[in-house]
Image: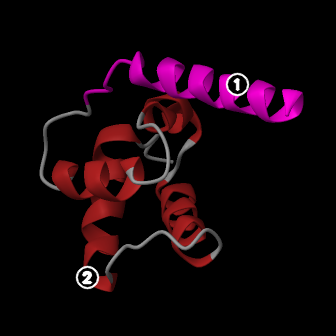
Amino acid sequence: MKILLIAVSLLAGMVAAQAEEKAVALKTAPGRDLVEAACSACHSLDYIGTNAPFMTPQVWQAEVNKMINAFGAPVPPDSVKPIVDYLVKNYGTGG
C-alpha cells in the first residue's frame, strides 16, 4: 500500500510539472500547424529549437522518418513533405 501511495504521489508531481510547462511558440510559416499537431502529440516542441543547430535537411528528413517508422507517430503520408519543408526552412542549418 505504501508503494502505491508513493507511486501516485510521484505521478501527481509529474503531471503538475507538465501543467506548468510554458508553451513553445514555433516560427510562423506554412506548415507550422502540421508540425505543432504531429510533434506535440508525443513530445514538447522545445526539442525542435534545441536540436535545430545540428539539423541539416537530410537529418530533419531522417528524424521525421524515425518518428513515424520507429515510434509510430500518426503522421499522414501527405503531411510528411510539408512538415520536413517547414523544419528545414525554419530550423535547418542549410547543410
The chief SS type of the magenta part is helix
Q: Residue at x 28, y 55 (%)?
A: 37
Q: Residue at x 87, y 32 (%)?
A: 3
Q: Nearer the viewer, residue 1 or 90?
A: 1
Query: Contact (CB < 8 A) between labels 2 and 1?
Result: no
- Say if 23 sits above or below 72 in the image: above
Give the x, y percent position of residue 6: 79, 25
- Judged left or right of residue 10, residue 79 is left
Residue 19 part of the magenta-drawn span: yes
Q: For the magenta stretch, what is the residue range?
A: 1-25
**Earlier along the polypeptide chain: callout 2 or callout 1?**
1
Of 58 and 66, nearer the camera is 66
Kindly identify the amino acid type of the residue bearing the numbered disc 2. Answer: Asp
Q: Which residue is mark 1?
A: 10
> How many C-alpha atoms fall within 10 Å of the one at disc 1: few (<14), some, or many (≥20)?
few
The verdict on residue 28 being magenta is: no
Q: Which residue is mark 2?
A: 78
The one of 85 and 63 positioned closer to us in this rendering:
63
Which residue occupies the extreme bottom position in the image? 77
Looking at the rendered structure, the kind of residue marked 1 is Leu
In the picture, the disc for residue 87 is none
The colouring scheme, among rainbow, by chain, secondary structure or one colour, is secondary structure
Choose top left, top right, bottom left or bottom right for residue 10. top right
Q: Position of residue 66 (x, y in %)?
A: 60, 68
SS for callout 2: helix
- Left or right of 79: which side holds 28? left
Is residue 19 depicted above or below 83 in this figure?
above
Dot 2: within a 10 Å radius of its alpha carbon, few (fewer than 14), some, or many (20 or more) residues? few
Answer with left or right where residue 10 lies relative to residue 19.
Answer: right
Does residue 8 lie above or below 84 as drawn? above
